[in-house]
Amino acid sequence: MARHRPDGLPPAAVARHGLAVASNPPLEALSDRQSAILALARGAGRVGVEDLAARFGVSPQTIRKDLNTLCDRRLLARQHGGAMLASGVENLGYAARRALAHAEKRRIAACCAALIPDGSSLFINIGTTTEEVARALVHHRNLLVVTNNIHVVSILLPCDGVEVVVAGGPVRRSDGGIVGEATVDLVSQFKLDFAVIGASALDEEGGLLDYDYREVRVARAILGNARQAILVADTGKFERSAPVRIGHVSQLHCVVMDRAPPLGFAAACQAAGTQLELAGPEECEMLTETGSLETETH
């Protein structure tokens, strides 16, 4: 079995210096096209082989070689049909996250909104998918929404049928999220019917992951103060990793995704009794016809 060679070093250099691990090569070592591809990925979150081939006027095979180079240097991570920014200890920028899987997020949001009956109270936390859920709720009536997401406030504030409570604390300029001790304190004052949460990454064992421990503290408080918790996430989250654990699918009542998750995650949901909804067009129609999750009363 061949041993892995450190990226960017010829075999002779490895043998000469006895190196087992090498740092990523400098960006100057990239070709102009590879640098441009990396810049596009940083702006959009991910790039596709066919789109890149058309943009640069080269063959898909050439683009795949470029992507392989960028992935070998851990600047990008391979994804079906293309690549995305490699996971690490920092999340993608807000604009890039909004652009990622946008159509899938809208379907997920419509499916989730069908689970929320009029007259409900709910938390909506930070995330571009949860923001789409807010957009899908604008025609609901008699909702109480508690949120730490400024964008959710902007979406729901004009709606006559929705009362909005904003959590206190500092607002992150990068994405409009509100985190901190004051945020946790306000969340802890409520006991609501639903929590709609997102996650930056998922693992196949059923773990929910994020990047910011302060944001995770708020998410945990939200989970602890909701009667039913709904995770909204596209399956691209399985291709990413993040360092901070929010929780596990066993803490959720429902997971709404764009398509079937990996078998391990589906098995974790089944073992925990967590409902799994797939937000394809047909599934959303079925949810509308069959009704919403029941709201617990205490």
Image (cartoon, helix red, strand yellow):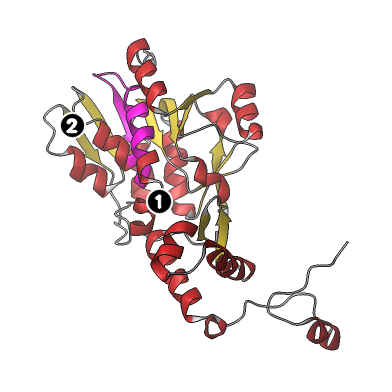
The quarter of the displayed image where residue 231 is located = top left
Residue drawn at x 41%, y 37% is 197
- Is 156 in the magenta? no
Res 189 visible: no
The quarter of the displayed image where residue 258 is located = top left
**186 in relation to 270, above or below:** below
Q: Which residue is mark 1?
A: 100
Residue drawn at x 32%, y 22% is 116
Specify few, some or many for label 2: CA neighbours under 10 Å numbering under 14, 14-19, or 20 or more: some
Q: Which residue is mark 2?
A: 163
Cα distance between the residues tagged 2 and 1: 29 Å
Q: Earlier in the sequence, mark 2 or mark 1?
A: 1
Residue 19: horizontal and vertical position, in percent?
80, 80
Kindly identify which numbered label has been placed on residue 38: none
**Quick one: 181 or 170, which is closer to the camera?**
170
Q: As drawn, which residue projects farthest toward the right?
A: 1
Specify few, some or many for label 1: CA neighbours under 10 Å numbering under 14, 14-19, or 20 or more: many
**281 in relation to 33, above or below:** above
Res 99 visible: yes
Amino acid type of the residue tagged 1 in the rendering: Leu
